[in-house]
Image: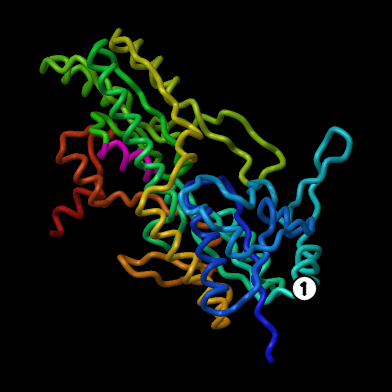
Amino acid sequence: MAEKMKLGVLTGGGDCPGLNAVIRAVVKTAINDYDMEVVGFMDGYEGLVENRYRQLKSADVSGILTLGGTILGTSNRADPFKFPVLQGDEYIYLDRSSQAVQNFERLGLDALIAIGGDGTMSASHGMAQKGLKIVGVPKTIDNDLFGTDQTFGFDSALASAAEAIDKIHSTAQSHHRVMIIEVMGRYAGWLALASGVAGGGDIILIPELPYQIDVICDKIKERNRKGKNFSIIVIGEGAHAEGGEMVVQRKIEHSPDQLRLGGVSNRLAAQIEGLTTLETRVTILGHLLRGGTPTAFDRILASRFGSQAVHLAYKGEYGKMVALRGSEIGNVPISDVAGKVRKVPLDSSLLKTAISLDTCLGVEHIPALEEAEMAI
C-alpha cells in the first residue's frame, strides 16, 4: 500500500476570526477525502523553525468552527529568513530557513499549508524557492492581500467596526460632538471605507486619498448649518494629511513589518477642535477588530479556502495560493502575491457610492473616479 500523504499546517501573522475554521477544514478534508495525516506547527513559521508541532485529528478540530483566534497560535515576527534571536538584551537576525526545510523533511511532510497575510505569503514564496511544497491561504482583516477579491477575516472585522460605529452614533447625537472612529487596515483603506459606508459615516478617510483638513472642517460646518449638530468620521490608521506622513505609534525592530501605525485620529481631533471649536472625541478600535466569533460569511469562505488548499496539495499544485474570484474559489501563484499590497482603486464603485450618499472623503475631487464616470 502507498504511504499516506502527510500535511503540515500553520497560521502566521496577526490573528483574525476564521483561522480556526480553516484549520478545521484542512484537517477534515485531508482525513475524510484523502486519509492523510496532518500536523500543526505552533506559532506560525516559528514552530517550523523550532520544530514545535502537534498531531491534528478530527477530534482536535471538533467545535472550533466558531472560535476566534487560532488553536495553533501565531506570530508576526517569525520570518525564517530573518529570524529574531535574543542575545543578551538585543535581538540579532539569523537565516533559519534551512533549519525549517530540514524539519519539514525530517517529519516526512509532503506539503505545507500556510495560512496568513502578505508577510506569511512573502515568507512562503521564499521557502518555496528553497524547495518546500507550499499552498497558501489568504488571511487578513485588512483585505489588502493581492490576488484575491476578499480575504477571510475582513467580513468579521467589518461587522465589529460597523457595530461600534452604530453605538457611537447615539452618543454623538446626544452630546452634539464630532466623533472620530479609527480602524485598522495599515496602508489600505478597505476596512475604513466599507465600515464607514455600512455605519453611515459622514466623513471617511483612507490612506489612498490624503485628506485636506479644510475640506473636512467645511463638511462639519455645513452639517451644523443644516441642523445636523454632530458628525461621524471613520478613519483608517494609515490615513494622512495631504503632504504629511502616516502616524507611527511605535517601531518593533524584530518584526518583518516594523511599523505599527495608530493615533492619526488624535492628531485629526486636535486640528478639528482648533479650526471649528467643536468638541471632538476619539475612539480607536484597534485589536477589538481582530477578535470574536467569525461571521457566517467568513466561516464559509474559510472552510472553502481550507478544503481547496488540501485539494491543491493532493494534486501536487504547489506554489499556489487559493483565492476568491467573484463567487468562485480559484488560485494564483504565490510569487504573484508576495511583496504586493492591494489598495482601494481610486475608481472604485464603493467610493462612488460613498459620494452619492453625500459622504465626504476628505478631498475636493478624485480625478480617477471622475474619468471613470465620463467613460461610461
Residue 245: x and y, percent? 48, 32
Given the current orientation, which residue lies at the most extreme bottom position? 1
Residue span colored magenta: 189-198
For residue 37, side relative to residue 215 (left or right): right
Q: Quadrant of residue 205?
A: top left
The x and y percentages for residue 251 are: 64, 34
Q: Could you tell me which quadrant the N terminus lies in?
A: bottom right
Measured as percent of width and height from the top left, residue 342 is found at 43, 54
Q: Looking at the picture, tell me which residue is in the foreground, 100 or 334.
A: 100
Residue nearer the viewer, 363 or 252? 252
**Magenta stretch: dominant secondary structure:** helix
The one nearer the camera, 54 or 317, is 54
Seen at 39% across and 69% down, the residue is 329
Query: Farthest left residue?
Result: 226
Residue 43 within the segment the image draws in magenta: no
Q: Identify the residue at image location x=46%, y=43%.
A: 187
Instruction: In the rendered view, tell whether residue 30 sits above or below residue 374.
Output: below
Q: What's the residue at 79%, 56% (across, down)?
A: 50
For the view shown, which residue lies furthest in the top direction? 277
User: Within 10 Å of the Cα at label 1, are there few (<14), some (14-19), or many (20+) other Cα atoms?
Assistant: few
**Secondary structure under badge 1?**
helix
Q: Quadrant of the C terminus?
A: bottom left
Q: Position of residue 152 (x, y in %)?
A: 43, 54
| Residue found at the very far front of the displayed protein | 59
> Which residue carries the number 1 mark?
105
Q: Which three-letter amino acid code belongs to the residue tagged 1?
A: Glu
